[in-house]
Image: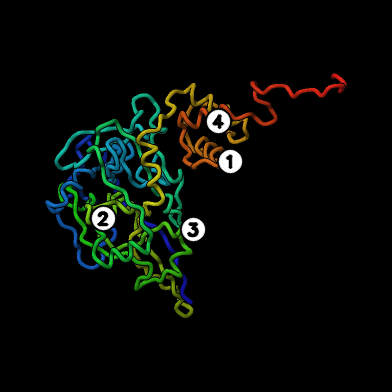
Amino acid sequence: MTSAIAVLAMAIAAVATPASAFDLPRPDQSAHLAKPVAVFGSDDRVNVPARLDWIAQRIGILFNNSARTVCTAFCVADNVIATAAHCFAKGQSSINARYADFNFVRNYDKSKTLARIEGATTGSAAQHVTTGDFKLRVRPPIDAAHDWAVARLPKNTCPADGLNVQVMSNDELIAAAGKKKIFQVSYHRDWAQWRPSYSKPCAVARDFDQAKWTSIAPDFLKAEQMVLHTCDTGGASSGSPLLIETADGAAVVAINVGTYVQSKVTPVGSGPARQRTETIANTAVNASAFADRIELMRTAPMLASGPQLRELQDALRALGHYAGRSDGAFGPAMKTAIEAFEAGAKLPVHGLPTKVIADRVLATPQRGVAPASAPAAPVPAGAPQR
């Protein structure tokens, strides 16, 4: 009997700490360059064609010198980027990273304009990044559907319109790929001089030669939000956009997050079992998982000061949603508390400490406590007075 062990390999590049913010290693200068994580058949990556240069201008490198990581990220508004959550070291237990230490450089090989996360200089960067989850599992049940992040940067970091994001069903994406309309633009650690590359139109499918959807789906949480594709990727391509060619130009349909691998173990008589590792497909998170966060992150006023956050923490505690410390910091416990409040109030669940949510929480009566402005109940005539 053959058993399969699945894992998601994340295409994040670890690099030696550069001497300066822009001194990323060139491929020919590193003795530890990784081979491509998943190139299906021949390597179809080429320089970005001139007709798609407008896309390259909206894609950049997201890196953290302290954590020694490099990923791809892309503009979705003049002050908002999208990428994979693990590019912010979420789910990377061996990496200790602060949001304030991340830098984004758009169109890296041509521009050297660096931007940090909004709030990085005031200690409020965490409020300006929203992710699918703070922890990610790369073994079944794999929660790659949560591996997305949307972050606010200073205004005018990106071209005003960014890349358009289009929500499509997986059936629609499979049909579009059949017409050779799905492609990828990304940075790769094994691609010369850190230039963006264009991965020619690739397949999107559920069934693959090595594994069928019936065996793949049980390995993922929210499998319906996963896009399995064969666009060529390499280290540092995590966070890159999967795009569709339309009559109105290209649009983002998913965020590339990793490579799905199965190790099949087959017993051989009384001897040791035989193990064979097969790369099944690359994985991306469907835009339906994050599209609604873009406008919120672009415009929503966030609570930025410690006192404001402490007030919100105390109010959430009084409502029974928060059990953490009143430390004025935004983290997993506070995100979960805000999400619980939003769900209970039948609001869209975002988990962000916005001023709108804070006002709503502060105006909600605490458990067993009547609103201060509530009038006393009238006493019927002739009733005994207390």
Q: CA distance from mark 4 to mark 2?
A: 45 Å
Residue 101 at x, y = what percent?
33, 33
Tell me which numbered mark, 4 or 3, is placed earlier along the sequence. Answer: 3
Compared across the picture, whether 377 is left or right of 26 comes to right
Residue under the point 43% across and 66% down: 216
Amino acid type at circle 2 is: Gly
Task: Decide: is 323 above or below 348.
Answer: above
Task: Give the structural element (helix, strand or loop) at label 1.
Answer: helix
Q: CA distance from mark 4 to mark 3?
A: 34 Å
Question: Label 4 belongs to which residue?
Answer: 361
Question: Label 3 belongs to which residue?
Answer: 141
Q: Is residue 35 visible?
A: no
- Furthest residue in direction bottom, as rendered: 269
Q: Nearer the viewer, mark 4 or mark 2?
A: 4
Q: Are marks 1 and 4 in contact (CB under 8 Å)?
A: no
Tell me which numbered mark, 4 or 2, is placed earlier along the sequence. Answer: 2
Residue 335 at x, y = what percent?
50, 37
Q: Is residue 114 visible?
A: yes
Q: CA distance from mark 2 to mark 3?
A: 24 Å
Question: Label 2 belongs to which residue?
Answer: 234
Task: Decide: is 246 above or below 153.
Answer: below
Amino acid type at circle 3 is: Pro
The quadrant in which residue 121 appears is: top left
Task: Decide: is 368 above or below 131.
Answer: above
**Observer-nearest of 376 and 380:** 380
Answer few, some or many: residues within 10 Å of disc 1's Cα (few below 14, many 20 plus, some between 14 and 19): few
Q: CA distance from mark 3 to mark 1?
A: 27 Å
Tell me which numbered mark, 3 or 1, is placed earlier along the sequence. Answer: 3
Disc on res. 344: 1
